[in-house]
Image: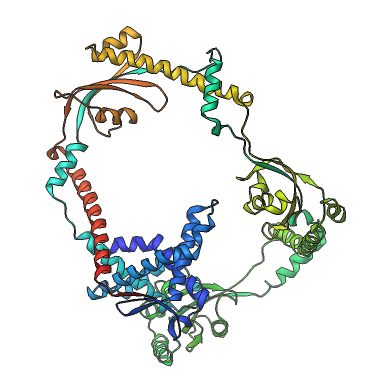
Amino acid sequence: MLQKIRDNVQGTLAKIIIAVIIVPFALFGIDAFFTGGVPEVAKVDGEAITEPELAQGIELERRRLLGQMQDRVDASLLEESRLRAPVLESLIERRLMLAAAERAGLHVGEAMLNQLIVENESFHENGEFSQARFQGLLAGSGMSPAQFKSLLREDMLVSQLMSGVEASEFVTVTELEGVARLTQQSLDARWLIVPVPAADASIAVPEERVAAYYEQNRAEFRTEETVRVEYLEIRLADLYQPVADEALREEYERRTTAFEGAEERRAAHIMLATQEDAARAKLAALRERAVAGEDFAQLARENSEDLGSATDGGDLGFSSGDAFPAEFEAALKALEPGGISEPVKTSSGWHLVKLLEVRRQQAPPFDQMRATIESELQRAAAEPMFVERSEKLADLTFNSDDLAEAARELGLEVRSSPAFGRRGGEGVFADARVIAAAFGKDVLEEGQNSERIDIGDDHAIVLRRAAHEPAREQELAEVAERIRTLLREAMVREQAEAKADELLAALAGGQGVEALASANGLEWKAEPDYMRGAPQVPEELGKALFDTPRSAEGTGHGKVVSGNGDVLVFAFDDFRDGELARLPAEQRRLLTGVFRRSHGIESAGHYQQHLRAVASVELF
């Protein structure tokens, strides 16, 4: 069970925990959770649920819905008024389950929490746990590692509780026998293949049938609403200018000067994640032991609270002077290789710093850095021009009757787009912001220039309606050939269906599949002892074989259309129900697991309902 919980926390649950933590602190600040005056929205058995907690849940639900909607955003589904009630109910249920877990005496150990944090990919850089990223993410949300662990522990307690409820379920032999009776059913099957020929223009389609299809399906024959726009765009890359070789070499020399004599220091540390003076005393004692000859790496493994480096003996890798907090770097710089500092206090806690190694940096050759330097110099020179021209573009097109004046002033070309619909077009016209502007009231209805649309920080565009084609119903003449093609395909299918009906009648009259196939020049196939769901026959046929009514003798016949359009005429006999004894041991084990999980999910739901029913819940 614990492994299952660990696996869950590694995946989706881990990401949810991060999101849950960051959102409310960004909205309200950490003080809102630990000081008075926070509005309450509900009480569960006397314990308050606050407005910030509810806001956190609403924001998380918005993010989940946005992820599901992707580019089909329905703003009405994201409104707080719609989300508030269901989110509050989910918070109440969570609070009830947490209380039940605590009453049950469930516990999550410190070692497990540490391992989950280290393995959480949200805190990884280059595939490994990063203490800096871990602390940075939490610091950005106003949370300490201890507070994060507390929330993680709560989630784990709830997971343990629900896993325990699910694991308590059992499966009866009667249930397994019932499933085996269905899943292990078998029969002897034979079938004919009536192919559907390709439809071609030689098949005559009556005009009255074309007209009738058109009248019955007018809604299918509507054009898409489209718009064409004229537009001006400014791209940062278009403003790049060549850089002289001399300038590139000068910049290279300037950068490589910083490498001359530069050193990288490899550090190890023992960290206690607290600001209390007691930590300093503990580290001082550890330093004495290390100076006396004890292995610093082993001391780090046993005592350091830096989860990422402790398993590596406190090794943090190399720093060129800016990887660690200033106090840490100062202590590291003052050491000789092998030296250990006095306790050092930083924003993350207290540290013992050890200098493991010093190495000198070497500058890459010019040819290796040339392209990067050139691109950076070009971008740096172009950015002020881009900002200036973008602002001028917005000014010149504001309340202007066309794009011509702005084009002249800025030396731009007025371009024309291909027609595109509300689902977008190609390139920049697939961007949701451009589509929204093109079909917005200002551009589409009033014929005005759009506001400047910023696409990232290096591309700006202004557009104006050039032509608009509303959706309309197409005339019969416009779609007649398309309808003929559809009807030709339907006619050849009808012919195949009619032939299949003849064969089916012959089967019902007592003729065998083999004889019918030979008489009609058709292919036939057989599959003895075919079991439900086995892959030997087409999926559509397999389903039809077991869905077809059968006689008391276990025989039957019918027809079904295959995935490629061909019609299959089939017959079967010797139908047999499955038996549990015939079920292999591994399948029986898997089937038992499926039933247990199903029962467990159902029981967990009932358990939640029970907790809610007996709880005291006040809504404000």
In the shown orientation, is residue 435 left or right of residue 524?
right
Q: Residue at x 40, y 64 (%)?
A: 86
x and y, in percent, of residue 81 in the image: 48, 65
Query: Picture coordinates of residue 453 (x, y %)?
Result: 70, 57
Observer-nearest of 117 and 18:
18
* Residue 459, image quadrant: bottom right
Comparing 618 with 464, the one in front is: 618
Identify the residue at the far top of this view: 519
Against 370, residue 257 (above or below) is below
Question: Horizontal placement of 465 versus 11: left or right?
Answer: right
Query: Residue 580: horizontal and vertical position, in percent?
Result: 14, 40
> Quick check: 171 left or right of 447?
left
The answer to whether one can see residue 424 in this image is: yes
Residue depicted at x 21% and y 38%? 183
Looking at the picture, does residue 76 appear above or below residue 328? Answer: above
Q: Quadrant of the C terminus?
A: bottom left
Quarter of image, res 274? bottom left
- Residue 319 position, x and y percent, is 56, 74
Q: How many marks?
A: 0
Residue at 61% from the left image edge and 33% from the top image edge: 473
Q: Specify whether residue 124 is in view.
A: no
Q: Taking 478 as reference, is 78 left or right?
A: left
- How was this image coloured? rainbow
Using the image as rendered, state which of residue 328 and residue 95 is in the foreground.
95
Location of residue 1 (image quadrant) = bottom left
Relative to 484, say whether 519 is above or below.
above
User: Is residue 171 placed above or below 302 in the rendered structure?
Assistant: above
Depth check: 448 or 5 in front? 448
